[in-house]
């Protein structure tokens, strides 16, 4: 995974990233992780324009600080850590603006028309329930159960201890389970 | 194990982080408690559904625009 970055991470070269390999690494990171970074961004800022900004800033910062990625196998958690910080910065900067439903991106859907409708409805209910979570629980849940980070990676991304990360995931699941009980019971 | 204790153990149970004795106690409680078995089942369904449907999908054009913007900003 992102093997090309290993060499750069192992050097002490203080110059800026070498253009050809740096660009390749940036594009590789983007191709592998943009959907996940965008999901984390959107689930936190809940706004397409801000999610775009967070995603762009995340990859730009990753490009500028690629030499700080000492373990390429942690690229995903490292990117999500940057994305989380950028998203929090956006929330602190912006004034609350109403979300235009037409701006919300489409959710992943299943293959057949009938199942597509059911999946779309479920995705919307799930997305709305995630949005109702407090920010700290929302971020932990998205990182663990949507993006599949381990608890220790969630802790790293959120800059908290593993016990706190696990507790946030636990509380988020409990709240969502209660919120969506009727829907989940039918699945 | 009480229902409250099982509830507190649920995440560790799902993460496979309970020791053998704790796991046996949790399994024994789940086998005799329909309420907790339902809670476990709903939580598993939530986790599976979230993996499948929780992600926000980027359309190809949107994805391409993002990459273009990043590469353009990188030069500035």
Image (spheres, helix red, strand yellow):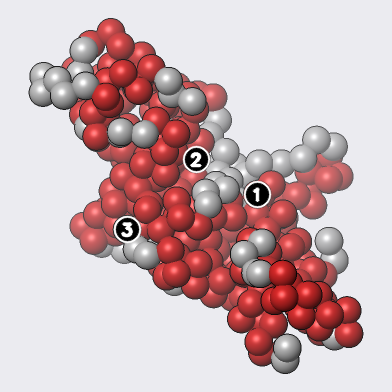
- To which quarter of the image does residue A24 belong? top left
Mark 1, chain letter?
Answer: B
Given contact means CB atoms under 8 Å apart, are the residues at marks 3 and 2 in contact?
no
Residues flagged by tags 3 and 2 on a common chain: yes
Mark 3, chain letter?
Answer: A
Q: Nearer the viewer, mark 3 or mark 2?
A: 3
- To which quarter of the image does residue A74 belong? top left
Provide residue B26's location: percent of width, then percent of height: 75, 78
Q: Nearer the viewer, mark 1 or mark 3?
A: 3
Which residue is at the front of the view, A179 or A158?
A158
Q: Residue furthest left?
A: A14
Given contact means CB atoms under 8 Å apart, are the residues at marks 1 and 3 in contact?
no
**Above or below: residue A62 compared with residue A85:** above
Residue at (79% x, 69% y) in the render: B41
Mark 2, chain letter?
Answer: A
**Above or below: residue A143 compared with residue A92:** above
Disc 3 on helix, strand or loop?
loop
Rounded to the nearest whole Å, what is the CA distance between mark 3 and mark 2? 18 Å
Which residue is labeled 1 in the image? B51
Which residue is labeled 3 in the image? A159
Disc 2 on helix, strand or loop?
helix
Left/right placement of residue A55 relative to residue B43 reads left
Residue at (43% x, 63% y) in the render: A162
Residues flagged by tags 1 and 3 on a common chain: no
Disc 1 on helix, strand or loop?
helix
Residue at (63% x, 61% y) in the render: B15
Which residue is labeled 2 in the image? A36
Q: Residues within 10 Å of mark 2 (few under 14, many from 20)?
A: many
Left/right placement of residue A93 relative to residue A174 reads left
């Amino acid at each position: 995974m992102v093997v090309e970055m290993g060499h750069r991470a192992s050097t002490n070269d203080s110059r800026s990233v070498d253009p050809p390999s740096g660009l390749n690494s940036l594009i590789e990171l983007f191709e592998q992780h943009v959907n996940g970074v965008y999901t984390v961004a959107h689930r936190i800022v809940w706004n397409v324009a801000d999610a775009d900004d967070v995603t762009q800033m995340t990859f730009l910062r990753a490009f500028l600080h690629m030499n700080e990625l000492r373990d390429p196998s942690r690229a995903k958690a490292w990117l999500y850590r940057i994305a989380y910080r950028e998203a929090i910065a956006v929330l602190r900067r912006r004034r609350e603006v109403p979300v235009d439903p037409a701006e919300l991106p489409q959710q992943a859907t299943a293959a057949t028309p009938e199942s597509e409708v059911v999946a779309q409805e479920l995705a919307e209910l799930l997305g709305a329930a995630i949005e109702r979570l407090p920010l700290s629980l929302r971020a932990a849940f998205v990182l663990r159960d949507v993006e599949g980070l381990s608890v220790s990676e969630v802790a790293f991304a959120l800059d908290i201890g593993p016990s706190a990360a696990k507790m946030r995931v636990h509380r988020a699941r409990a709240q969502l389970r209660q919120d969506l009980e009727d829907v989940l019971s039918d699945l | 194990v009480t229902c409250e204790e099982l509830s507190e153990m649920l995440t560790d149970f799902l993460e496979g982080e309970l020791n053998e004795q704790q796991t046996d106690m949790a399994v024994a409680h789940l086998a005799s408690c329909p309420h907790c078995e339902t809670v476990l089942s709903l939580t598993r369904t939530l986790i599976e559904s979230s993996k499948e449907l929780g992600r926000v999908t980027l359309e190809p054009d949107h994805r391409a625009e993002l990459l273009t913007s990043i590469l353009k900003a990188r030069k500035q």
